[in-house]
Image: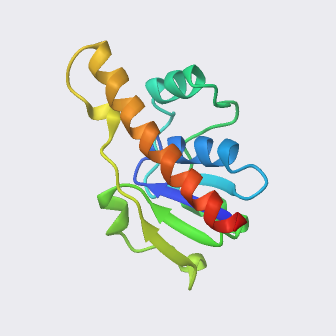
């Protein structure tokens, strides 16, 4: 199953979903991520904490959903509330769409430990969701 994870800026949550789904769902899932208004770079803490947990970060980039029209996903998943409310590009047509919103850990307030805790909590939830989905697909 091909999944496209979307958030507005494609710099944190959608990148986390892409990296985790690609690795934990290998063989069952193919994942990509994009944004409706992407920024220049992936948030550095996103890359740091993915690497810390053993996820591949090479090739992760903030990109427009228009750049992924040829990806042809089976399902589009919005991961932030603002992206969930946006009109999707026409090329998405009748593709199944879901919303799996999570708080943005890059917007946590506090010291380094607070940011780390926020990222780890979000990554735990993503891992659980991806594992559930893989079990569904494989059963």
Evaluate whether residue 12 shows in this view. no
- The x and y percentages for residue 91 are 60, 77
Q: Which quadrant of the structure image shows residue 61? A: top right
- 132 or 35, which is in the foreground? 132
Outermost residue to the top:
112
- The x and y percentages for residue 59 are 69, 36
| Viewport quadrant of the C terminus | bottom right
- 114 or 91, which is in the foreground? 114
Evaluate whether residue 30 shows in this view. yes
Q: Which residue is painted at 54% across and 78% down in the image?
A: 96
Outermost residue to the left:
109
Outermost residue to the bottom:
94
Q: Where is 66 relative to 20, above or below?
A: below
- The x and y percentages for residue 16 are 51, 41
Q: Which residue is painted at 32% across and 30% down in the image?
A: 118
Q: Which residue is painted at 50% across and 24% down in the image?
A: 49
Q: Is residue 26 left or right of residue 122?
A: right
Q: Which residue is painted at 40% across and 53% down in the image?
A: 8
Q: Where is 53 relative to 131, above or below?
A: above
- 41 or 53, which is in the foreground? 53
Q: Where is 110 relative to 77, above or below?
A: above
- The x and y percentages for residue 125 are 42, 45
Q: Is residue 64 left or right of residue 123?
A: right
- 104 or 113, which is in the foreground? 113
Outermost residue to the right:
27
Q: Which quadrant of the structure image shows residue 122? A: top left
Q: Which quadrant of the structure image shows residue 108? A: top left
Q: How is the image coloured?
A: rainbow
């Amino acid at each position: 199953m091909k999944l496209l994870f979307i958030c507005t800026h494609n710099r944190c949550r959608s990148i986390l979903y892409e990296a985790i789904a690609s690795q934990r769902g290998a063989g069952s899932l193919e994942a990509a991520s994009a944004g409706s208004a992407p920024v220049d770079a992936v948030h550095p803490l996103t890359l740091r904490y993915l690497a810390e947990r053993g996820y591949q970060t090479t090739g992760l980039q903030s990109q427009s959903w228009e750049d992924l029209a040829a990806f042809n996903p089976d399902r589009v998943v919005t991961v932030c509330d603002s992206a969930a409310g946006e009109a999707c590009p026409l090329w998405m047509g009748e593709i199944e769409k879901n919303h799996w919103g999570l708080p943005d850990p890059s917007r946590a307030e506090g010291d380094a430990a607070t940011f780390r805790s926020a990222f780890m909590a979000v990554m735990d939830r993503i891992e659980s969701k991806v594992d559930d989905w893989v079990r569904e697909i494989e059963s």
